Image (spheres, rainbow, N blue to C red):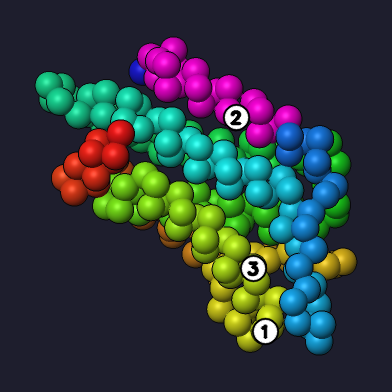
């Protein structure tokens, strides 16, 4: 089944996108965008490898739908959920490979655990929401949530304490709170459960995605 998925047109597109973002993340492993809207508080950083990983998750949602998500949705009785699970793994696990490439290239110390936790949460959230809201809305949610929560985390430390994202501080990243790791893991479990139940699509999302293209 894995060979069939990777040999499909969507699978080849996914591998190409993965390779591109992994290379970009490695080349820009030591770069990030420093955000400090409130001078009284420490700056936060959007690391370029983290952004590449989130872009990959969004791209994976788009290129794997609807081919990989529904190869076995119609006409196949047994193990219909395998292609959908394979696509969900590609969306959730693939971005971590971008971060691995960045680590190999030498990211600043303490950056990777925060980025990995945030990317896991955002990618899993996209997989969780996409079957109900549609692909594009899920990707916009991922981007919007990352940017909004990062900005809010800089504006107020009290807001950052409630954020599900493990925001990177500047210059010291520190450790990732266990609560944020737990949220990312629970979101991932929920994403796979929804994928098995829906095969990656609900009726309204199917109509919405196919009506738009």
Residue 7 placed where, x, y %?
44, 12
Helix, strand or loop at mark 1: loop
Q: Nearer the viewer, residue 212 or 23?
A: 212
Residue drawn at x 58%, y 28% is: 17
Residue 196 seen in the figure: no
Q: Residues within 10 Å of mark 3 (few under 14, many from 20)?
A: many
Indicate which disc, 2 or 3, sits on the residue closer to the N terminus.
Answer: 2
Which residue, given by chain and number where applicable, does mark 1 sit on?
Answer: 156
Distance, label 2 to label 1, CA atoms, is 35 Å
Helix, strand or loop at mark 3: helix
Indicate which disc, 1 or 3, sits on the residue closer to the N terminus.
Answer: 3
Magenta extent: 2-23
Residue 132 seen in the figure: yes
Helix, strand or loop at mark 2: helix
Which residue, given by chain and number where applicable, does mark 3 sit on?
Answer: 150
Indicate which disc, 2 or 1, sits on the residue closer to the N terminus.
Answer: 2
| Corner quadrant of residue 190 | bottom left
């Amino acid at each position: 089944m894995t060979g069939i998925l990777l040999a499909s047109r969507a699978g080849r597109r996914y591998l190409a996108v993965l390779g591109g973002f992994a290379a970009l993340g490695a080349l820009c492993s030591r770069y990030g965008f420093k955000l400090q809207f409130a001078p009284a508080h420490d700056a936060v950083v959007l690391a370029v490898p983290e952004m590449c990983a989130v872009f990959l998750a969004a791209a994976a949602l788009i290129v794997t739908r609807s081919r990989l998500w529904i190869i076995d949705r119609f006409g196949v009785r047994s193990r219909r959920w395998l292609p959908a699970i394979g696509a969900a793994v590609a969306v959730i696990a693939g971005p971590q490979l971008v971060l691995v490439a960045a680590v190999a290239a030498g990211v600043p110390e303490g950056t990777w655990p925060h980025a990995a936790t945030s990317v896991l949460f955002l990618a899993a959230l996209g997989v969780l929401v996409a079957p109900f809201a549609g692909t594009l809305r899920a990707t916009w949610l991922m981007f919007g949530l990352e940017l909004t929560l990062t900005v809010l985390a800089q504006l107020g430390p009290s807001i950052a304490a409630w954020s599900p994202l493990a925001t990177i501080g500047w210059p010291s990243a520190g450790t990732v709170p266990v609560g944020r790791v737990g949220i990312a893991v629970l979101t991932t479990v929920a994403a796979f459960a929804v994928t098995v139940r829906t095969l990656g699509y609900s009726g309204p999302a199917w109509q919405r995605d196919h009506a738009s293209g």
